[in-house]
Image (cartoon, helix red, strand yellow):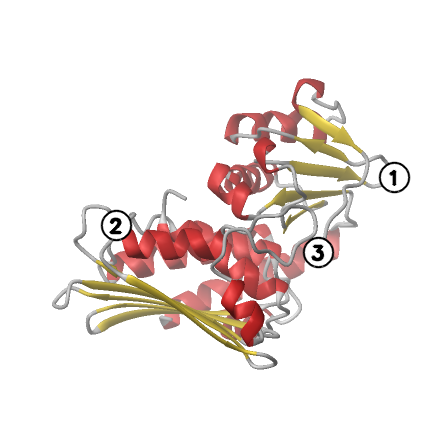
Amino acid sequence: MEELSMHVLDIVENSTRAGAALVEIVIAEDRAADRLTIEIIDDGEGMGEDILKSALDPFYTTKTVRRIGLGLPLLAHAAETAGGAFSIESEKGSGTRVTAHFSLSHIDRQPLGNMADTMVTLLAGYPAVDFLYTHRTGERKFVLDTRELKEELEDVPINTPEVLRFIRTTVVEGLKEIGAAD
Amino acid sequence: MAKLKIEDLKKIKERIHAENALREGDRRVKVTVHMGTCGIAAGAREVMNALMAEIEEAKVADVVVTTSGCMGLCSREPEVTIEIIGQEPIVYEYMNTNKMRQVFKRHILNGEVQTPFVLARGREKRD
């Protein structure tokens, strides 16, 4: 992966496969502490202790079409390479929380990349799932809540091209406004 | 979100409502961009964005875009499946933004399968 936003897309993909109805994406930049935190919290089916133990093993996957599963190991590696840490908590039946910390200024920290592309891709692929994306830079914050958008849209699907373009612009401008990192 | 934004969204909704009243709007094509770890790492998100930009530019309403996971042929990503209703699905391999634009214009709009990029014909196995 070249960007952290691509890891986000990939990890959220896991959440949707776990049957999540709501996926929370939290990105927090703390310049003073030189810390970038990415959290993905879902209300999917979760994992029992046995599966959780294997989740970071690249040779473990629940899929049957191939024998390797690299999503979580790649994110864990990206965090550890950038002076950070990675953790995953899950409980069968109540969802999963993936947390990755990075040193914001670390030379090996991947750029955040294009979160607007990631959100639009998720909404195009999973219009029925709700997403709550919160991005904090110190005191400032940008929030995209698809539940609010859907309420406003009524019967217009959220994956309509015009709506997706609106969301893309909203994310791009919102992140610019709060001075989000690259 | 700012108040202004919600107003913009309302306008979009009204416009779509007005357009829908005029057109038949049935789905003709389903495009699936494979968005597994392998696909994302190989550039599937950019392919997806190029496709969405083409759809918007061409103002077509009968093409639906979705994503799927990996189907096991990770080394040939990014992969894109085109299903024109009533026809055999076509899976394209090693896609990039330029190939995606070509496939959109020639295959999706004109019905000409872009044979040099084809990986397989028919439905794939997924889990």
Q: Is residue A163 left or right of residue B124?
A: left
Q: Residue furthest right?
A: B86
The image quarter containing residue A103 is: bottom left
- In this rendering, the label closer to the viewer, 3 or 1: 1
- Which residue carries the number 3 mark? B20
| Residue type, label 3 | Asn
| Residue type, label 2 | Arg
Q: Residues within 10 Å of mark 1 (few under 14, many from 20)?
A: few
Residue drawn where x is 55% and y is 65% of the image: A15
Looking at the rendered image, the quarter that the C terminus of chain B falls into is bottom right
Relative to A41, residue A156 above or below: above
Please state the horizontal and vertical placement of residue A41, each as a whole percent of the image.
Answer: 46, 72
- What distance separates the C-alpha of mark 2 from that of mark 3? 46 Å
Q: Residues within 10 Å of mark 3 (few under 14, many from 20)?
A: few
Residue drawn where x is 57% and y is 68% of the image: A51
- In this rendering, the label closer to the viewer, 2 or 3: 2
- What distance separates the C-alpha of mark 1 from that of mark 2? 47 Å
Relative depth, front residue between B38 and A123? B38
Residue drawn where x is 77% and y is 39% of the image: B83
- In this rendering, the label closer to the viewer, 1 or 2: 2
- Residue B67 visible to an observer of this rendering: yes
- Which residue carries the number 2 mark? A109
Chain under callout 2 = A
Q: Secondary structure at mark 3?
A: helix
Please state the horizontal and vertical placement of residue B4, each as a whole percent of the image.
Answer: 38, 67
Q: Is residue B77 left or right of residue A137?
A: right
Relative depth, front residue between A93 and A64? A64
Please state the horizontal and vertical placement of residue A99, each as a whole percent of the image.
Answer: 37, 68
Give whichever of discs 3 and 1 has the lower sequence position.
Answer: 3
The numbered dot on residue A38 is none
- Which residue carries the number 1 mark? B86
The image quarter containing residue A17 is: bottom right
